[in-house]
Image (cartoon, rainbow, N blue to C red):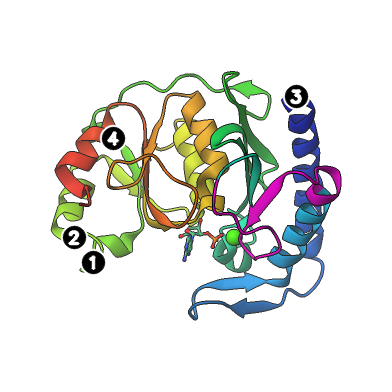
Amino acid sequence: MNLNAIDRYAKSLIKEAGHKIRVSFFNTIDIDSKADANDLVTNIDKEIERFVVDRVKQDFPEHKIVSEEGFGDKITSLDGTVWFLDPIDGTMNFIHQRRNFAISLGIYVDGVGMLGYIYDVMGDDLYHAAKGEGAYFNDERLPQLEITPLEEALIGINASWVAPNTKVDNDKIIQLVTRCRGTRSYGSAAIELAYVSSGRIDAYISMRLAPWDIAGGIVIAQEVGAVATSLQGEAPHLLGTDTFIVTRPGLHEEILSKYIRLK
Ligand code: 2AM
Ligand code: CA
């Protein structure tokens, strides 16, 4: 298989999808909720997913595609070539802010991340990587990440985990956010992964992410030496939702062992 050709194909497909999303703002957007009142989806999430899924199925009939709104395939193993697509990562931002959302795409072969893309649609910024060939912010090569001490780290985390909750010990999270230099919350896992990879934040932590939220970002993160695991310290498995942490080298072990490791 020619991964260079697939890389060119994927980039042009993502840009075309991004253009469709920008044009969608000229029309009224229909908003629905899914599992709960704050779990939102729009007609645009569905239209963009359908557009990309149809193209991939037509042009790569032997590949699988796993995507958030259900137009793709259900998989039970990572054998073969699998595309992981989130047509709009950060749907709440898409609706409320009309910015700060991304198209997230990862292409895996037999479970190994080969190509990764995060397209900040309104910024027209594409973060991308091919395994072994480095990561890029548009045409700019992203440097290897260096170690930062926790005291100088900006951490991407949602404020709800600082309040009492059933997932993590919030006293420990209070200690973590007090010790680090500052916290940020962007509302799109893909963008936060892109920000870790480009050194704009130093870590990102989430209690529940799906494969399409992280598959593309993991490929990019690995190319710059970032470390991504579940909060149990295991490699992300991409067959269901899980907790997630990605950091610069050095920070990962300290954050997990002292503040947030789940059994
Ligand atoms: P989404 O916008 O595609 O739904 C925001 O908190 C981040 O978490 C976004 O990347 C969002 O993706 C993701 N997210 C929100 N609810 C989720 C859920 N129930 N399962 C997995 N990921 C979720
Ligand atoms: Ca989504």
Count the labels in the image: 4
At label 3, counting other C-alpha atoms closer than 10 Å, the crowd grade (few under 14, some 14-19, many 20 or more) is: few
**Going from the N terminus, do you reach mark 3 or mark 4 first?**
3
**Disc 1 versus disc 2: distance between alpha carbons?**
6 Å
Which quarter of the rendering shows the N terminus? top right
Along the line of sight, which residue is nearer the eye, 53 or 162? 53
At label 1, counting other C-alpha atoms closer than 10 Å, the crowd grade (few under 14, some 14-19, many 20 or more) is: few
**Disc 1 versus disc 4: distance between alpha carbons?**
22 Å
**Going from the N terminus, do you reach mark 1 or mark 2 first?**
1
Q: Where is residue 263 in the image (x, y as percent from the top left)?
A: 20, 52
Q: Of the numbered discs in the image, which one, if any, rests on residue 170?
A: 2
Q: Position of residue 29 (x, y in %)?
A: 73, 73
**Disc 2 versus disc 4: distance between alpha carbons?**
18 Å
Q: Residues at badges 1 and 2 in contact (C-beta under 8 Å)?
A: yes
Q: Mark 4 points at which residue?
A: 252
Q: Which amino acid does label 2 sit on?
A: Asn
